Image (tube, helix red, strand yellow):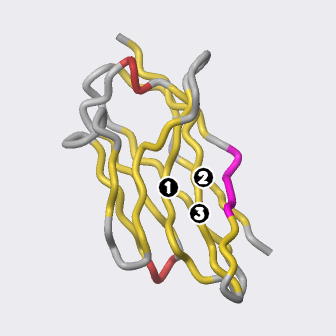
Amino acid sequence: QVQLVESGGGLVQAGGSLRLSCAVSRSTFTLNTIGWYRQAPGKQRELVATISSGGSTKYADSVKGRFTISGDDAKNTVHLQMNSLKPEDTAVYSCYAALNRFGLVYDYWGQGTQVTVSS
């Protein structure tokens, strides 16, 4: 019933840009929050950016000013525009959605997409 399908990862040189997209198929669920987390080898998963149903955004300090999250309500899609990429941005990026149904909130994750930034 719920699917998060990511696209847009890849290999880019430092200073370059990538755009990640996540299409959400959510049936009768309503969206609370959607966004991106990332996990680099040997490190814990960390929040990158999220956007709420009301449009409020949250960013990790390390990406502020470089990454922009935006939502397309009509297409149930969220985008992460990543500019001025650095080698330390290399990680598996996973789409995350907190969906509400009958007052209960459920967490969903995409399969992850690799982002590699070469120096």
The local secondary structure at tag 2 comes to strand
Is residue 104 in the magenta section? no
- Of the numbered discs 3 and 1, the one sitting upstream in the chain is 1
Identify the mark at residue 117; answer none if there is no mark: none
Give coordinates of residue 68: x percent, y percent: 29, 52
Residue found 67% across the figure and 54% down from its top: 109
Mark 3–mark 1 Cα distance, whole angstroms, equals 13 Å
Residue found 40% across the figure and 69% down from its top: 71
User: Magenta region: which residues?
Assistant: 107-111
The rendered magenta stretch, by its main secondary structure, is classed as: strand
Pointer 1 residue: 21
Identify the mark at residue 6; answer none if there is no mark: 2
Q: Are marks 2 and 1 in contact (CB under 8 Å)?
A: yes
Q: Is residue 1 above or below residue 27?
A: above
Q: Is residue 17 above or below residue 95?
A: above
Q: Which of pointers 3 and 1 indicates the residue nearer the eye?
A: 3
| Residue type, numbered disc 3 | Ala
Local packing at callout 2 (Cα closer than 10 Å; few below 14, some 14-19, many 20+) is many
Q: Is residue 109 above or below residue 85?
A: below
Give coordinates of residue 105: x percent, y percent: 66, 73
Q: Nearer the viewer, residue 78 or 103?
A: 103
Q: Residue farthest to the right?
A: 1
